[in-house]
Image (cartoon, rainbow, N blue to C red):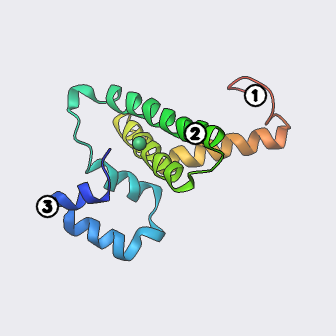
Amino acid sequence: MINGQDIKDMDDNNVMWEYYSQSYSNKMSLNEYQSMASKTAIYSLQHQILYPALGLAGEAGEVANKVKKMIRDGKLDRSGIAAELGDVLWYVAALARDLNIDLQDLASQNLEKLYGRKERGTLGGNGDNR
Ligand SMILES: [Mg+2]
């Protein structure tokens, strides 16, 4: 998985990464994140959609594995889980980009759906369209 060090190693992106990490990381919008993350995507065009979809499933599994180890070892690896959640976020952003979905719009539409369900009292239950 690409991390901050990998990004620094990419000369083309170094200046931009330094700029964001020192000045704006706490204020970064989802679209800014998506744009910055896309500069670290190294898979080929022919593997668009498939590569990030598989990566997303893999990283979600890594999150689950960290949680599983919490049960086994009796301690929470909070920073490790956070790192895996970051990897999940990267793949969500990449998959959305490959599908030409604006990450900010995606987040807004998701909240709109959930608050609609809350208003209708359907947060619980089953089905995508409730
Ligand atoms: Mg990972």
Image position of 62 (left or right of 41): right
Q: Residue type at mark 2?
A: Lys
Q: Which residue lies under the disc numbered 2?
A: 69
Q: Which residue lies under the disc numbered 3?
A: 11
The residue drawn where x is 32% and y is 29% is 51
Q: Nearer the viewer, mark 1 or mark 3?
A: 3
**Quarter of the picture holding the C terminus:** top right
Secondary structure at badge 1 equals loop
Q: Nearer the viewer, mark 2 or mark 1?
A: 2
- Residue 71 or residue 93, whichever sits in front: 71
Q: Residue type at mark 3?
A: Asp
Q: CA distance from mark 2 to mark 1?
A: 35 Å
Q: Residue type at mark 1?
A: Arg
User: Ligand 1 is found in which quarter of the picture?
Assistant: top left
Image position of 46 (left or right of 101): left
The residue drawn where x is 25% and y is 51% is 39
Secondary structure at badge 3 equals helix
- Residue 76 or residue 108, whichever sits in front: 76
Q: Which residue lies under the disc numbered 1?
A: 130
**Place of residue 84 in the rendered image (x, y in percent of width and height, measured from the top left):** 47, 46
**Quarter of the picture holding the N terminus:** top left
